[in-house]
Image (cartoon, grey):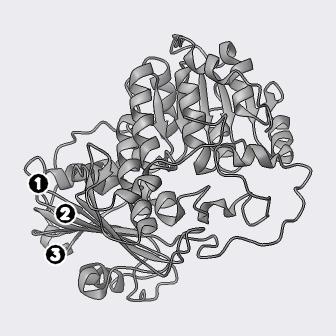
Amino acid sequence: MAAAGLTLAGSLNAAPKVRRISPNEKMNVAVIGAGGKGSSDTDSVASENIVALCDIDDNVLNARGQKYPGAKKYNDYRKMLDEMNKEIDAVIVATPDHHHAPASIRAMRLGKHVYCQKPLTHSVYEARLMRDTARKYKVATQMGNQGSAESGLRKAIEVVQAGAIGNVRQVHVWSNRPIWPQGMARPKDTPPVPSNIHWDLFLGPAPERPYHPDYQPFKWRGWVDYGTGALGDMACHTANMPFRALKLGYPTSIEAETSGFNGESYPKSSTIRFEFPAREGLAPVSFFWYDGGRTPNDDIAGEVLTRIEGQKDKEGKPMARKLPGSGCLLIGDKGHLFSPDDYGAKFFLLPEKSFVDFKGPDQTIPRSPGHYKEWIEACKGGKPAFSNFDIAAYLTEIILLGCVAIRAGKRVEWDGPKMKSKNAPEVAQFVKRKYRKGWEV
């Protein structure tokens, strides 16, 4: 295996030293996963010093290196963190999902602040570990669900928690994902690995298998070994607002109905139901997730459809009575809250005639100076980012239980604190995965 001689144990067990960075000082940032979202993440913190770039694709690495010529280039983040430990203050992790936890945890154990893309982890176990590790090493963290910084999302939370729509007993969230292939079997052909791809390093903690272009660079999201499907990709965005507004703790059960699941790739479509008990004086909640073209039925979405039907498109024509590709609907006993996008940036209270005179509650949540600025300020001694790992890992842990239910193929009764199923002990293999040697967490 590439770089097998890395000082894994030594680097992880070394006493971390979190360097204090003054607000007027630039911090040294290393980027793991330099292309795709990692590219825009890097550009968004370019006010700091970009000191290292890591990617398994030499073409991506060299192209990004031209923009940041002062950054050292690596293919293996383990080697980068070993060699540049003293030169790095913070790390951005924008790899495929299966590398999120191994890279982030290694960095945090070295005392590095971490910004990690969503979903925060590939498994339920890793989410719990990420939260615990961030707390232990007292590093500044943030997950890349940019909607957390939107004023609309924060106001929606205030509106719900002020009781404007009453007790919420149902939440419906739907997505236009997947926009990548799902529901397919493993390829049988084994084409050669392109010269620019370091395939063993792409696999990292995942089981060994031959290279195929159906896995990399973008199609990895649909494969169980590398991604978390439509749910993992988008629920950290779309479910973020209701999760916070309704203080959704651990569910008592999760059940998935899918278009078929073969164990290799996530299904073409799914409906997942989470049951949440009463908590902190709030009513029990049934939370429904839909993907692959599925949406709530007309009986559920009637108020939303009526509002849409009354709107006009850009050309001034009446809009079709059809739900948008993605959205979120909270159904309360006094009204509904509808957000028509992935990030909760906008929302509407329905039926509109019931809220004509609604002025909104007092502001209780500070507004954001900007998603990336929150993290940078936290790294320099400021208050924690709104989507720091303490809450982001909790959100991710709960969301990824939907992936567990898909793989289980049955209703899963769940004991959240113990992180185990009450009725299906066999799902433990989906809660915590096995890692290839040298990539353990």
Residue type for callout 2:
Val
According to the picture, the residue beneath numbered tag 2 turns out to be 285
Query: Is 344 positioned to the left or the right of 364 in the image?
Result: right
Q: Nearer the viewer, mark 3 or mark 2?
A: 2
Kindly state the secondary structure of the residue where label 3 is placed: helix
Residue 398 position (above or below residue 287): above
Residue 439 position (above or below residue 300): above
According to the picture, the residue beneath numbered tag 1 turns out to be 282
Q: Nearer the viewer, residue 256 or 42?
A: 256
Please rate how many residues cluster around mark 1, counting C-alpha atoms within 10 Å: few if below 14, some from 14 to 19, many from 20: some
The image shows residue 252 at horizontal and vertical percentages of 22, 58
Please rate how many residues cluster around mark 2, counting C-alpha atoms within 10 Å: few if below 14, some from 14 to 19, many from 20: many
Quarter of the picture containing the C terminus is top right
According to the picture, the residue beneath numbered tag 3 turns out to be 353
The answer to whether the residue labelled 1 contacts the one labelled 2, judged by CB atoms less than 8 Å apart, is yes
Q: Nearer the viewer, residue 350 or 311?
A: 350
> First in sequence: mark 3 or mark 2?
2
Task: Give the alpha-carbon distance from disc 1 to disc 3, as whole Å.
Answer: 26 Å
Look at 46% across and 26% down and name the residue there.
140
The image shows residue 315 at horizontal and vertical percentages of 52, 83
Quarter of the picture containing the N terminus is top right
